[in-house]
Amino acid sequence: MSSNSTSLPDYSLAPEQVPLVGSLTLDDGERERLKSRIADTLQSRGMALVAHYYVDGDIQDLAEQTGGCVSDSLEMARFGRDHQASNLVVAGVRFMGETAKILSPEKRVFMPTLEAECSLDLGCPPDAFAQFTAEHPDRTVVVYANTSARVKALADWVVTSSCALDIVSSLKARGEKILWAPDKHLGAYIQKQTQADMLLWSGACVVHEEFKSKALDDLRKVYPDAGVLVHPESPASVIQGADVVGSTKAIVDAAQRMPNDTFIVATDRGIFHKLRQQNPGKTFIEAPTAGDGATCRSCAHCPWMAMNELRALDRVLHDDAYMASCEILVDPELGLRAKQPLDRMLAFQAG
Ligand code: 13P
Ligand code: SF4
């Protein structure tokens, strides 16, 4: 049994709320100079760089070369919590930095820029969400990690796309009815897979929502032997055409594991750096979006992830005033409340 919310407004972002981010080109000499300075500073100060698969490839490489990590949002959270460094630099979007701080309030957490938002987080205003939860006290509140600390503090569970299916399945087995936020596509996918009773918030990711199923079907005809790997923030019609549906890490793992020579990938194109690095003999093709239009909505690259540039990372490490402005701060009491559903998620995964 399942149910959907009909009374909620549409919390998708309007085009003017999505920043236009052009990519900054650095010449090779400058790139190498910055990379070497960043690596030296991270190591001399014992700082760990925790990066997402969508950020600049040079930053992903730096994270690995300096003993940090590149992964999906679940693994980033676990890695940041378990690492001995007392200072973390999180290259990703704001909720990832906030999660690191909530899990380790004693650590200092910095980001290359605090302007790196997420459309799902922005599409779930805490006051409106608090009202929604208050209207449904009989439901277990499950929120996606792509939310603010205030929204997490209202939740019973936090999940990521790596563990959402398992956690919701276990809640359903316990007879619990669920209130889900913010991603309607991921929520609908989980609902379909688990048949749980889920009331869905109506947010969406501006990047994944742009993938088009008709164009994907056409592309499949051109590459009939290609494996199709899809992130579950995509619309149901796109998910339907997938061979593998999963988190960014699940996509990276599938590309290594599956025997196909060619893959069509429906997620942010930042992930192609790792896919090509790990599979030099394989071909990776971007799943079709609405096209390279005038806005960044349809370029399969998250405009907020794109703000994680090498120069911003260098600046946060070497300009004290800028560094101070890029520190993640979470009110301790709020952090304690938001930590409970995060701890629950990590304990579920560990158990
Ligand atoms: P993952 O947890 O799969 O890395 O997803 C995070 C995200 O923001 C995808 O758009
Ligand atoms: Fe948020 Fe979408 Fe960007 Fe992921 S890709 S951080 S869900 S806006």
Image: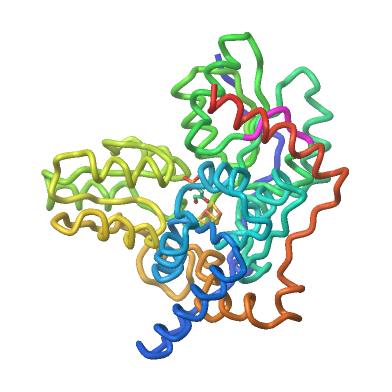
**Residue 127 coordinates in the image, percent (x, y):** 83, 45
Corner quadrant of residue 317: bottom right
Let me know if residue 194 is in the magenta part: no
Type of secondary structure dominating the magenta stretch: loop
Query: In the image, what residue occupies the spot 66% across and 50% down?
Result: 100
**Residue 249 coordinates in the image, percent (x, y):** 40, 44
Q: Quadrant of the N terminus?
A: top right
How many marks do you count on the picture? 0
Range of residues picked out in magenta: 154-158
**Residue 119 coordinates in the image, percent (x, y):** 60, 56
Query: Which residue is at the front of the view, 332 or 238?
Result: 332
Let me know if residue 155 is in the magenta part: yes
Query: In the image, what residue occupies the spot 46% across and 83% down?
Result: 24
In the image: residue 156, left or right of residue 49: right
Q: Is residue 105 above or below residue 277?
A: above
Residue situated furthest front in the rendering: 44
Q: Is residue 261 above or below residue 138?
A: below
Corner quadrant of residue 82: top right
